[in-house]
Amino acid sequence: MKIIRLFVAFTFICLVFSPKMQAVGPEPDEANGITAEEDNVLLDSTYDTESAAMGQPNNTPNHRLVRIDFTKSIPCAEVVQISSQWLVHFKKIEVGAVEVESADLKQFSGVGKTTGRKYTASKKAFFPEKSVRIKNDVKEGKFVLEFQVAGPPNPPGKADPNPKKTFRFKVQRTMRYTFANGKVKTLDQAAIDISCR
């Protein structure tokens, strides 16, 4: 009888003090390949700033989370504020060497500072340039991550100086990395280039 009471008391205590668990599902996937999340817009009043930070949580050597954030005046558009996160994937190409393979958009927000337009970005990045160099103790690579951005006109009734024109431009960020034993060791961001299309 004592054993049953102890078992019931133990079970009750475990149920009362056990942590609650929640399931987290994946974010919905837009069918058109374009996404825009307006909740993460940066509030910065400067018009020629850029910043980039490497995400640390959940990074593995060959899968790196990269932030590309900037506020710039775009000649074919307006002053645009962009905040984005990309998951960059690397692959082994030969013994000990690593090359960039793909990059997936994880978060994006963009807003026109003049018109208030909501900007969107392509969900996949392109690599117009990539190279790997192995010489003596130097093991490094370089690539350019490129993605497309579009700002459609505001809906009718909301002010827009170009109500029939979609603003389009591409963003290119040069990145350099080092590797050893088939794993990326460091990943640094360099120049950013924005051009109209």
Image (tube, grey):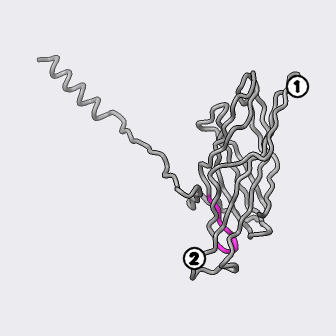
Relative to 155, does residue 83 appear above or below in the rendering?
above
Please say whether residue 143 is one of the residues in the magenta stretch: no
Name the amino acid, label 2.
Pro
**Mark 1 neighbour class, 10 Å CA radius: few under 14, some 14 to 19, many 20 or more:** few
Quarter of the image with the C terminus is bottom right
Residue 23 rendering spot, x and y as whole percentages: 40, 41
Measure how far apart labels 1 and 2 are at the Cα level: 56 Å
Name the amino acid, label 1.
Lys
Residue 109 rendering spot, x and y as whole percentages: 62, 59
Q: Residue furthest bottom?
A: 157
Residue 155: mark in rendering: 2
Per the image, the residue denoted by label 1 is 135
Relative to 114, does residue 67 appear above or below in the rendering?
above
Q: Is residue 167 left or right of residue 6?
A: right
Please identify the quarter of the rendering in which residue 101 is found: top right
Local SS, label 2: loop
Residue 49 rendering spot, x and y as whole percentages: 77, 59
**Mark 2 neighbour class, 10 Å CA radius: few under 14, some 14 to 19, many 20 or more:** few
Q: Is residue 31 left or right of residue 111?
A: left
Local SS, label 1: strand
Q: Is residue 138 left or right of residue 99?
A: right
Quarter of the image with the N terminus is top left
Please say whether residue 114 is one of the residues in the magenta stretch: yes
Please identify the quarter of the rendering in which residue 141 is found: top right
Relative to 104, does residue 80 appear above or below in the rendering?
below
Residue in view at x 70 percent, y 46 percent: 53
Q: Residue furthest left?
A: 1
- Sequence-wise first label, 1 or 2: 1
Relative to 32, does residue 113 appear above or below in the rendering?
below
User: Where does the magenta region start and end?
Assistant: 109-116
Residue 156 rendering spot, x and y as whole percentages: 57, 80
Residue in view at x 60 percent, y 52 percent: 107
